[in-house]
Image: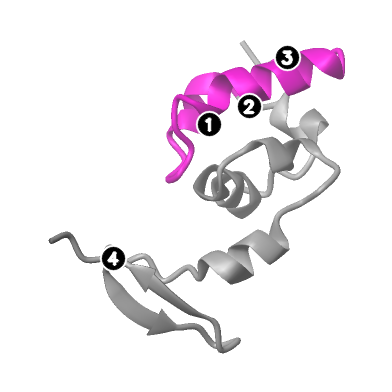
Amino acid sequence: MKTKGTLRTCKAGHQYYKSSDCPVCPVCEQAKKPEEDFLRLLSAPARRALENAGIRTLTHLSQWREDEVLELHGAGPASIPRLRKALAEAGLRFKI
């Protein structure tokens, strides 16, 4: 029988199960998810990767190369097509 992981409680009091050492509470993370901008298109790890690098706008993202974004911890290959599309819709693209 497969277990759900370890029962944890975050600082806000939410209880959740995690099978990894990741300390992020999924309830708190969902509450922080943007609703309007391009970051909402990404998974939580990819979104945090960009936010931690200071990338919060498409204009700033356009100053990065794709390979640089992929080097950020949490940003994976599945993020790139979504980011490319968001950039294209704004008339922008990744730095070459």
| Image depth: mark 4 or mark 2 in front | 4
* CB within 8 Å, label 2 to label 1: yes
Residue type highlighted by circle 2 = Trp
- Residue depicted at 41% across the width and 71% down the height: 23
Q: Disc 3 marks which residue?
A: 93
Please name which of the two marks, 2 or 1, marks the residue nearer to the observer: 1
Q: Neighbour class for label 4 at 10 Å: few (<14), some, many (≥20)?
A: few
- Labels 1 and 3: the sequence-earlier one: 1
* Among the two numbered marks 2 and 1 on one chain, the one whose residue lies closer to the N terminus: 2
Q: Amino acid at mark 1?
A: Val
Query: Which residue is tagged 2?
Result: 64
Q: Which mark is residue 4?
A: 4
Question: How many neighbours does mark 1 have within 10 angstroms: few (below 14), some (14-19), or many (20 or more)?
Answer: many
Q: Is residue 16 above or below residue 26?
A: below
Tell me the residue that label 1 is attached to. 69
- What is the quadrant of the C terminus in the image? top right
Q: Using a 10 Å C-alpha cutoff, classify the residue at mark 3 as few (fewer than 14 neighbours), some (14 to 19) or many (20 or more).
A: many
Position of 41 with respect to 35 (left or right) is: left
Q: Residue at the far front: name it.
A: 1
Q: Earlier in the sequence, mark 1 or mark 4?
A: 4
Q: State if disc 2 and disc 4 touch (CB < 8 Å).
A: no
Going by the numbered disc 4, the residue's amino acid type is Lys
Q: Looking at the picture, how far across and down is residue 65, in whole percent? A: 58, 21
Separation (CA) of disc 1 from disc 3? 13 Å
Query: Along the polypeptide, which appears first: circle 4 or circle 2?
Result: 4
Q: Amino acid at mark 3?
A: Arg
